[in-house]
Image (spheres, helix red, strand yellow):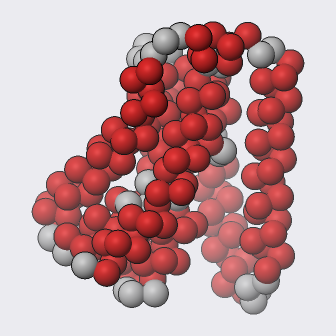
Amino acid sequence: MIKYILLSLISGIFIGYFLPYSQLYSTAGMGFLYILIFIIGISIGYNPEPVKRALKSGKKSRLLLPLFSIGGALSGGIIAGIITEVPLKFSLAIAGGLGWYSLAGPMISTVSPIYGALAFLSNIGREIITYITVPIIGERSPPEVSIAMGGATAMDTTLPLITKFSGKEAVLWGLYNGSVLSVTAPVLISVFLMV
């Protein structure tokens, strides 16, 4: 799985270097995301029982999952900033991307191209670490761990992996957590960049 992600990234860099940017890239990317979410919807419709169980589980603490995901990411950003001597403003903005690399990199690049590139690499690194780690710990830990690890991507690109290794009940909570983090990320990045 990782080799395909890295091959895709390197191919994209190569193509992007030689071909001028086109709105087609962005449109195609969103189209593939919609198809992915559509396929997940078919999976839920085919077997709705895990989602019904998730709703009836009574684990109201899962409603706080986005709060813990954000808190963990920002805490990690502070620690990483101290270790690497990256200014707090940028380490928090990078961590505030919450795994959404295609947003964090460009937003932060408007203030600092170097930290924008670091934001892209850091947030895509989070997704790659999720792809590596979830198959190892997914079946042995609560689904919240895999979902929080995926961050904003838990609603799209890492959701199939999380579902496979943490169970179909994770679909609902992955969509919930990813949606909240996707709405929160641009706000956090903007706030930290203004400090």
In the image, what residue occupies the spot 84% across and 23% down? 45
Q: How far across and down, in percent of the image, does residue 89 sit?
A: 24, 73
In the image, what residue occupies the spot 78% across and 24% down? 44
Q: How far across and down, in percent of the image, does residue 153 sit?
A: 57, 47
- The correct choice, above or below, for 172 with respect to 87 in the image is above
Q: Is residue 167 left or right of residue 107?
A: right
- The correct choice, above or below, for 114 with respect to 13 in the image is below
25 and 136: which is toward the camera: 25
Q: How far across and down, in percent of the image, does residue 189 sit?
A: 40, 69
In the image, what residue occupies the spot 52% across and 62% down? 101
Q: Is residue 28 left or right of residue 174?
A: right
Q: How far across and down, in percent of the image, does residue 115 sit?
A: 36, 77
| Image quarter hosting the C terminus | bottom left
In the image, what residue occupies the spot 58% across and 47% down? 179
Q: In this view, does 88 lie to the left or right of 132?
A: left
Can I make out residue 133 in this image?
A: no
Q: Quadrant of residue 30?
A: bottom right
182 and 29: which is toward the camera: 182
- The correct choice, above or below, for 48 with respect to 101 in the image is above
| Image quarter hosting the N terminus | top right
Q: Quadrant of residue 161?
A: top right
